[in-house]
Amino acid sequence: MCLALLLAGAARAESSGAEIAHLRLDRTEDGLLLSANVQFELPQAVDDALQKGIPMYFVAEAVLLRDRWYWYDKQVATATRHMRLSYQPLTRRWRLVVSPTQIGSSGLALGQNFDTRDEALALVQRISHWKIADASEVDPDARYNVDFRFRLDVSQLPRPFQIGAVGQSDWTIVASRNQRLALETPR
């Protein structure tokens, strides 16, 4: 029974088809910067929904944890990046909106248009110099880990798609990675 559960968990991880090919952490005078490259192919169901004009929401999350031998690791900082990828059939253009808060709520967002889906998706998959913590939050003498997670957020889809997506691997895009932070002195 335990073996069956382990195999099911491994199959679930494999079915997402997403992996973090590159993860880099840089400490600068401004703070801790994360760069990552997430590789995945859009499942057919997701691609079909996009082609019909239904936006897809992706979320990148980073958590900075300070090692403590006497207790659970202390959460020092968290950062979240929300991305909405949509196709506009009238103009036949793709639009990507990036925001530090959930898209649709009040806040700052950056939008960019693309001619092809592959151009827009390349920007979703590549995160460059994303500030996840201020320099004042990172002690140079302490040990830290960074938990990075990237996923397709099905909770922001229209209700009929949320109901249909439950339990289906076609709607699962998830990748996560934990990396120890090797601190350097600021340049």
Image (cartoon, rainbow, N blue to C red):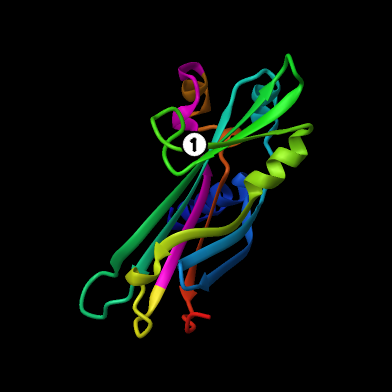
* 154 up-or-down from 49: above or below: below
Note whether residue 41 is visible. Answer: no
Residue 152, magenta (yes or no): yes
* 139 up-or-down from 84: above or below: below
Note whether residue 138 is visible. Answer: yes
Mark 1 falls on what kind of element?
A: loop
* Residue hosting label 1: 153
Q: Position of residue 100 (x, y in %)?
A: 45, 44
Answer with left or right where residue 146 lies relative to residue 18: left
In front here: 94 or 39? 94
Q: How many marks?
A: 1
Q: Position of residue 147 (x, y in %)?
A: 44, 62
Answer with left or right where residue 37 lies relative to residue 179: right
Q: Residue at x 65, y 19 (%)?
A: 53
Task: Tell me the amino acid under the disc marked 1.
Answer: Asp
In front here: 73 or 164? 73
**Residues shaded magenta:** 145-160
Q: Residue at x 36, y 73 (%)?
A: 138
Dot 1, how many residues are within 10 Å of its Cα: few (below 14), some (14-19), or many (20+)?
many
Which residue of the protein is positioned furthest toward the top in this rendering?
90
In front here: 50 or 28? 28
Q: Position of residue 114 (x, y in %)?
A: 74, 34
Residue 148, magenta (yes or no): yes
Q: Position of residue 146 (x, y in %)?
A: 44, 66
Answer with left or right where residue 115 lies relative to residue 69: right
